[in-house]
Image (cartoon, helix red, strand yellow):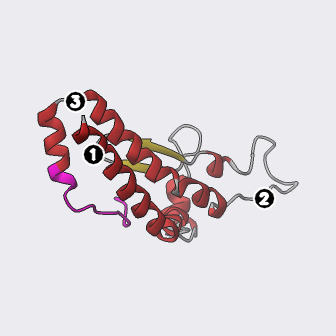
Amino acid sequence: MADSAFTVRVEGLDELKRALRQLKDSDLNKAVREVNKAAAEIVKPEARKTAPSGHRSRKDNKRYKPGKLEKSITVLASANSAVVKAGSSSRVPYAGAIHFGFPRRHIRPNRFLFRAMARTSDQVSETYEREISEVLRDKLEK
């Protein structure tokens, strides 16, 4: 799968991660993971709203269920990063072809995840900055 063309870089995040590793504080790692997840969760509703839902015609296979791509959008978070992901290899294997395109099959790219991130990037950065400042302030006050 291709690397994401849309990322948010946070100045000083590498130093923060290094400090977290040196502290070996599991509560702080968990709090940073939650902040990452909260920031990424902002993108999820917009991505679901803009994801192609497909339409079922009478000629389609009975097992074809439109909306599987939309329902497969999830957020994965760790202390280092957060990812908004669509599809899975077993249930929605065509997610990559829809998002990045598949010229041999005449599928044009529909970069709904990138558009969702672009639309919500200001809100994501504000939330991340506010939440990470709060976590660090709480940790330093203890």
Q: Which residue carries the number 2 mark? A: 55
For image coordinates 64% across by 46% down, the residue present is 71
Work out whether residue 44 or residue 16 is closer to the camera in this orientation and state it.
16
**Residue stretch in magenta:** 1-15
For image coordinates 19% across by 58% down, the residue present is 12
Whether the magenta-drawn stretch holds residue 11 is answered as yes
Q: Which residue carries the number 3 mark? A: 25
Residue density around tag 1, few if under 14, some if 14–19, many if 20 or more, within 10 Å: some
For image coordinates 64% across by 52% down, the residue present is 70
* 45 relative position to 25: left or right: right
* Amino acid type of the residue that numbered disc 2 sits on in the rendered structure: His
Give the foreground label among 3 and 2.
Answer: 3
Query: Based on the displayed image, in which of its 4 quarters is residue 27 positioned?
Result: top left
The answer to which of marks 1 and 3 sits earlier in the sequence is 3
Q: Main secondary structure of the magenta part?
A: loop
Q: Position of residue 97 (x, y in %)?
A: 52, 59
Residue 100, above or below 135: below
For image coordinates 76% across by 40% down, the residue present is 63
Work out which quarter of the rendered image holds the C terminus and state it. top left
Give the foreground label among 1 and 2.
Answer: 1
Distance between the Cα atoms at labels 3 and 2? 49 Å
Which numbered circle lies on residue 26?
none
In the image as oriented, which residue stretches furthest toward the left?
Answer: 22
Residue density around tag 3, few if under 14, some if 14–19, many if 20 or more, within 10 Å: few
Whether the magenta-drawn stretch holds residue 110 is answered as no
Residue density around tag 2, few if under 14, some if 14–19, many if 20 or more, within 10 Å: few
Q: Position of residue 36 (x, y in %)?
A: 38, 47
- Say what secondary structure mark 3 lies in: loop
